[in-house]
Image (tube, grey):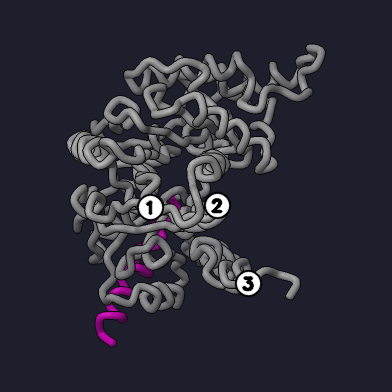
Amino acid sequence: MPVSEYITEAVKKSSWIRKMFEEGTRLKAIHGEDNVFDFSIGNPDADPPEDFFREFESASRSREKGVHGYMPNAGFNEVRSQIASMVTRDHGIDIASDSIIMTCGAAGGLNVLFKTILNPGDEIIVPAPYFVEYGFYTANHGGVLKPVKTDPDFSLNVGNIINAVTDKTAAVLINSPNNPTGRIYSEEAVTELSSALRAKSAGKRSIYLISDEPYRDIVFTDTKVPSILKHYEHSIVATSYSKTLSLPGERIGYLAVNPACDDFSRLMSGLVFSNRILGFVNAPALMQRIVGKLSSARVDINLYRKRRDMLVDVLKRAGYSFPDPEGAFYIFCSCPSDDDVDFVSHLQKYNILAVPGSGFGCPGNFRLTFCVSEKTIAGSFSAFKEALETYKAR
C-alpha cells in the first residue's frame, strides 16, 4: 500500500470544514455565487491594517547583507525581544526574549510543542467543542486527544477536566475565544482550572496548560480574555497573526512560555530543536521583521462586529437557538434534532453551507462563520427560515 493506514483513515475523517468548502464550490458552479450562502470556512477577509503595508514595503526594500539568510532557529533575537515586550504588556507578566519561539503560525507552534512534550500514549485534554485539527496535531506526535464536555453554554467545566486527568496527562489545551462557539472562558474559570492543575501537579509530573489564542484580539464585548501566563506557572501560549492582522496565508506566529515552567531551559531547548527537525527550521524571515514592529496594530474588528450582529438577528428571527458569540467569528447553533449531519445536509438543499458540530466533537450543533459578505448574510434569512420549518415538519 503506497499510503500509510493511518493517513488513509485520517483522510476519511478529515475536516468537515474543508468538505463543506468544497461542496460550496460545487453548488456555486450550479446555482451561481449569489444564490449560495456559504458560512463554512473561517477565512478572515478584513483588510490588514495600513501599518502592515507600510512595514511590508519597508522590509521588502532592505538590502542589508544576510537579510534573507539563516537565523537562530527560535527566530530573530530582535523580533523575539519585541514580541516579549508585547506579551509582557498584554498578559501582565514579565517575559523575556528567551521565552519566545517564532513559529509558522499557531498550527506550527502547536506541532512544535506537542513534539517536544509528548511521550507515546500521552494525553492532551481538551474541552469540547474544539478545533478539529487538534486531534491530528496530537496524533502526529504519538499523543491521544481526550475531549471533555463543557457546560451547556459552552463555558469551561473545570470538574470535568480534572476528572479526566490521569498519569498520562501531559497538558490541558484550551482555545479562547473559542472556535467554534465564540465563547470566552472566564477569569474565574481560568483561575479555578489553574489551582486545580497546580494541585494535580504537586509532587508529580507537571501538567501544562496550553492556550491556543489566534482570536485573542477578536472580541466584541467588554470581556477581557484572561491570561493563563498570569494564572499558572506551567503555561504556554500558542498564537498567530492570522486573525489579529488578517494574515492567514503568511503563516507567522509564536509560542510564549512562562519562565516559571518546570525545567524551563530544557523545555526551551526542546522547542528550538523541534522547530528545526519538523522542517519549519524557523518562521518566515520577512514576516518576522514585519510583525515585530506591529505590536499595537490590529485588524478593524468593527467589520466582524457588524456581521455578527446581522447574522445573530437573521438566525434569531428564523427561529434558531445559540449563545451569542463573545469573540472569534463563529456562531454555534443547536440543531432541531440530535443528528447534526442530517440537518446540515438538509440545509444544503436550501444552498446553505454549514459545518456539523460532530466535526468539533459536539454533535447536535452546527457552526456558521460570519466572515462572509453582508450580502450573503442579508440574503440568507428566507433560506434559513424555510429550512428549519420544513425540517421540523418532516
Identify the residue position indicated by label 1 in the image. Answer: 168
Number of on-image labels: 3
Question: Counting residues from the N terminus, which is met first, the one under dot 3 or under dot 1?
Answer: 3
Percent across and percent down for residue 178 are 35, 47
Q: Nearer the viewer, residue 375 or 341?
A: 341
Identify the amino acid type marked 1. Answer: Lys
Find residue 348 and report its image quarter: bottom left
User: Quick one: SS at disc 3?
Assistant: helix
| Horizontal and vertical percent position of residue 312 | 29, 53
User: Does the CB distance between marks 2 and 1 fall below 8 Å?
Assistant: no
Tell me if label 3 and label 1 are in contact, CB under 8 Å. Answer: no
Q: Nearer the viewer, mark 2 or mark 1?
A: 1
Q: Is residue 287 above or below residue 135?
A: above
In the rendered structure, find residue 125 and report the number of the disc placed on it.
Answer: none
Q: Secondary structure at mark 2?
A: loop
Let me know if residue 386 is in the magenta part.
yes
Of callouts 2 and 1, the N-terminal one: 2
Asked if residue 216 can be seen in this view, the reply is: yes
Reply above or below: 1 against 328.
below
Q: Residue at x 49, y 47 (%)?
A: 118
The answer for how far apart the CA atoms under marks 3 and 1 are is: 25 Å
Type of residue at label 3? Glu
Magenta span: 374-394
Instruction: Give the alpha-carbon distance from disc 2 to disc 1, as whole Å.
Output: 14 Å
- Residue tagged by mark 3? 5
Tell me the quarter of the image containing the N terminus: bottom right
Q: Earlier in the sequence, mark 3 or mark 2?
A: 3
Per the image, label 1 sits on a secondary structure element best described as loop
Residue type highlighted by circle 2: His
Instruction: Name the residue at 50% across, 24% down.
Output: 265
Label 2: which residue? Answer: 141
